[in-house]
Amino acid sequence: MADKDIVRPEGAAEDWTIPQGWDRYSPAEHAMWDRLFDRQARMLPGRVAPEFLKGLDILRLSKPGIPDFDELSERLMKATGWQVVAVPGLVPDDVFFDHLANRRFVSGNFIRTPEQLDYLQEPDIFHDVFGHVPLLANPVFADYMQAYGQGGQRAAQHGAIDRLARLYWYTVEFGLINTVEGLRIYGAGIVSSYGESVFALDDASPNRIGFDLRRLMRTRYRIDDYQQSYFVIDSFEDLLDQTLRTDFAPIYSDLAGTADIAPEELLPDDQLHSRGTQAYALSKAETA
């Protein structure tokens, strides 16, 4: 997502964009992209939403090497009117929302090192482009992302960005979708992670809960490890419909006086796809 307490780096434009600098990538950096891409592309079929795999084909992301944003944006513009722009890292909330509202997806232009193969704190180009961009070739999800950006601009006026951030986290980053073949992943934080691509679907530890907007906005999340709960949407069309037809202002007002829900907590009226054992989180707590 974004960060509200950072200063625009020297050399960044007023909208925080910078040149991608594609010509400056080293052979080792291109090789890292190819290594990550190959690993995920081989294990995602049968696990990821089919719309994601279709997006990979539409955007030709299987082409070797780090994608050139100019070429990628040209294909994406033809599909859904979106483009990818480079930024120096995390950006302020208002900048982030403005880009999304205008169908621009911000991406870091650096790629992780071999030592960061399975985890890095700040999203890199593989997370941002491989994880997020394929679904932007889907017209429904592309509209949802724009609606989210517009909603973020309104949330700022209500002092409710933290509530809305949870919607982004549990859908765009760590969402699951129910398909006729069973649960599939679509959130970029899962799709770009080898370990969580398995954990989110196969492990008995996490809860998998039917999507409920108000419940989700009350639920805290993990930023340093696998999620203890995942929310499951029925379809991208339903997700977009709930976003477009909902007046969030009364929700923000109603939730202002409610307690947060812990990441692992279940409520009596939750629609459960699976009740988690929380064994993974408990084992990590024991060794901490």
Image (cartoon, rainbow, N blue to C red):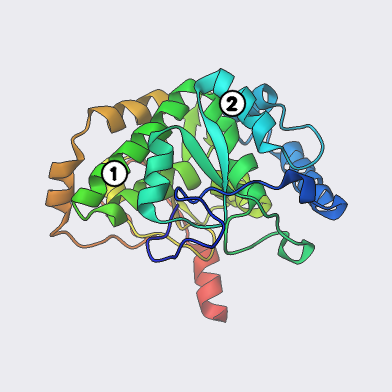
Circle 2 packing at 10 Å, graded few (<14), some (14-19), many (20+), is: many
Whole-percent x, y for residue 144 in the image: 39, 31
Picture layout, residue 80 above or below residue 97: above
Residue drawn at (52%, 62%) of the image: 9
Q: Which residue is mark 1?
A: 153
Q: Nearer the viewer, residue 59 or 267?
A: 59
> SS for tag 1?
helix
Q: Nearer the viewer, residue 148 or 233?
A: 148
Using the rendered image of the protein, determine whether residue 274 is visible from the camera's viewpoint. no
Whole-percent x, y for residue 15 in the image: 45, 47
Q: Amino acid at mark 2?
A: Leu
Picture layout, residue 186 above or below residue 203: above
User: Farthest residue in the right direction?
Assistant: 27
Distance (Cα) linking label 2 and label 1: 24 Å
- Tag count: 2
| Mark drawn on residue 97 | none
| Mark drawn on residue 76 | 2
Q: Nearer the viewer, residue 32 or 48?
A: 32
Residue 129: quarter of image:
top right
Residue drawn at (36%, 31%) of the image: 239
Picture layout, residue 128 above or below residue 138: below
Picture layout, residue 81 above or below residue 89: above
